[in-house]
Amino acid sequence: MRKFLLLLSLITVLCVPSMAKADLLYLNFGTATNYDGEATNKVSVSGTLTGDNPQTITTDAGTFLWEKAASQSSNTNVNTNHLRWYKGDILHITPAAGVTITKVRIKCTASNYCKNMGVSTGSITIATATPFINVWTGEANTEFTITASEAQVRCSWIEVEYTKVEGAVATPTIAMGENNTVVLSHADGADIYYTLDETTPSASSTKYEVPFTITGLTTVSAIAVKEGKSSAVVSKSVNLNTVGSIAEFIELASADAVKINAPVTAAYQNGINLYVKDANGDFLLVYGKIDGVTAQNGDVFASVTGTWSPYNGLPEMAVTAIGDKSAGTAVEPELIESIEETPGDRLSLYVVYNNVNIVKDASDDKGKTYTMTDENGDNLTLYNNFVASDNRYTPVEIPEGEGFNVYGFISTHKGTPQLQPVEVVGGQVMETVATPVFTPASGSALSVGDQITIECETEGAKIYFTTGNETPTADSQLYEGPLTFSEEVTINAIAVMDGMLDSEVVSATYTLYDPNARSAMYNFGDAAELVLPEGVAVPTVQSKVNENSVFNDKTFISGDISLLFTTTATSNNTYPQWWLGAKSLEARVYNGTTMTFAAATGKITSITFTKGGNSTSWTWPAANKLTITPAAGTLADQVWTAPEGGVQSVSFEFGASARIGTIEVAYAADTLAGIEGIGADNSDAPVEYFNLQGIRVSASNLTPGIYVRRQGSSVVKVLVK
């Protein structure tokens, strides 16, 4: 029995592996020092990490390699005191021999640089508040990846928690070679065994001797065996990296670089866009810059390599390499007899349409969108990417007129076919009829019986009009003379003339005149149009807060409306203030500012805010950052409308900043009523004016508004405009 126990004890000792030791590693980018733990080692990293051949950071824990996304032009790099990597970039982490990584913590510089990371194994917790740390947890002894999936990442350090077993055999490496071959390797020359059927490999599995070929998506699992010891199992899904046609490339739809290892013929190149055709007659848009590569129609490339990168439904390749060029036969466009026959399932096909009309889309302020119409009246959108404002391309000019032949490539926008034009020839370029002009101007308030005229500068043009939301055409009602106003209305007009393009459609809206309607304007972009409160001065220094330009506890008066600014802020920097920007003056309000509007007479019916002249975009608080009292009104597109009947006062409490150019307050004034004089004739008595608070004011300096005028015993309210 003693011998048996001793033997059992000895066996137990021999079977216990060496204890794993927990370690911490910090990769320090720049000057970061605020680590959370005591690292076994700290590695300082500086400079550019990636390029055409990404560099690898090697540590005791393993290797770290950043793979640049094909869509990015910038390399991962250390910038001042943090590492920057970009949307789509992948961090490959490969543990060293005997190492198991259990946690990775990424310290970001701000919450918006710590967003939405994807991982290939384990899980990651995204932090959105200080200290902005993303935490990956799992158990990895083979490669795993972390991807910047939604935004740029800026990290000051990366902490890795890991355990290491001394004397362990490192895992083998699985990589794709050329022409769909898989290459297995081991740094220490150990024997490698593998499986392809998702089973666990062992020393009795297939021994790796030479690279082997795959025919589709395959899971390769492998172990390394050396001196009787086995490594951990490593598995990797691999897919084809070489295909023989454009159709196979599209079907594969791989995010990894794939080579079309067959000749392709260039049909057209403009800047970074290259359209190619293969032997099967399929076309593909290849985009991206390959230094020194230019193509003419008919040039043949031995191969082309890139990643699958569709855009709005259009198959595209983001090119990474291209084969040798030789001369070939020019690609001829396919004639499409009518727009109705457009083959929307043959995307990037080179085509030509004959005898079509072209009109620019007036609603596209970028000047890229046109409508092409054939003899049957069918339409197709032309979307011209090659405009002068984009320096990546040589501009393609699109004329407007009739009878053109249009060459281009069939495209799509979210499932709707359109054409990328590359050349327009023949046809008759036509001028456009002048846009009709309304008198009075749109927005006027008219009385019943007032006349509305519509005129066109193009002599001989006919004007057609509709009302409401109906778009006018040459089949609409012909304008033959002034229209008589009777009620609120919107009129739409178009001018048409033979031999010219139709004018733009123009609309005018008219409201019924209200004799009691008034308007008060606060134009913070023009000091001459404001009555300044005491103590407020026009700022004279650009982008500099001036104590005389702040509005806190200041009241502006326009007509019968007062505007009071108050704030809970305690600093000049966040007081409501007049701001002198590079382009103009504007009012700026911040979190804690309240603007209170009050009518001395009548009721406020609406308030319209417009942006300041310095703003490139309209800055306005979100709905949950703006409190309006009373809450019964409505706010839409910075226009507040009072509840029915109006309000005497309304306040806007801001929970975020806004940049304001003008504020227009519409209000309904009280009906003016005279007060009968009592006593003798007052014609010779002096005239005195009082504001509605009873304070006497100078008759020579009256601002617009309502006053009480007294002449002897005659007292009346008067309106000064």
Image (cartoon, helix red, strand yellow):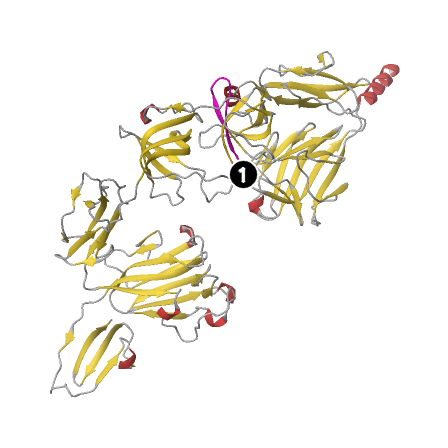
Quadrant hosting residue 632: bottom left
Give the amino acid type for the residue marked by disc 1 in the picture. Answer: Glu
Residue 175 horizontal/vertical position (percent): 67, 23
Q: Is residue 211 left or right of residue 241?
A: right
Foreground residue, 167 or 385? 385
Residue 490 horizontal/vertical position (percent): 21, 49
Residue 281 horizontal/vertical position (percent): 47, 19
Foreground residue, 458 or 167? 458
Which residue sits at x=49%, y=24%? 330
Q: What are the residue bounds of the magenta stretch?
A: 271-284
Q: Which residue is mark 1?
A: 150
Residue 570 appears in the rendering: no
The quarter of the image holding the N terminus is top right
Q: Is residue 408 left or right of residue 84?
A: left
| Residues packed near mark 1 inside 10 Å, few (<14), some (14 to 19) or many (20 plus) | some
Of all residues, the one furthest to the right in this rendering is 3
The quarter of the image holding the C terminus is bottom left
Residue 153 appears in the rendering: yes
Is-magenta flag for residue 275? yes
The image shows residue 698, relative to residue 653, as above or below, that is: below
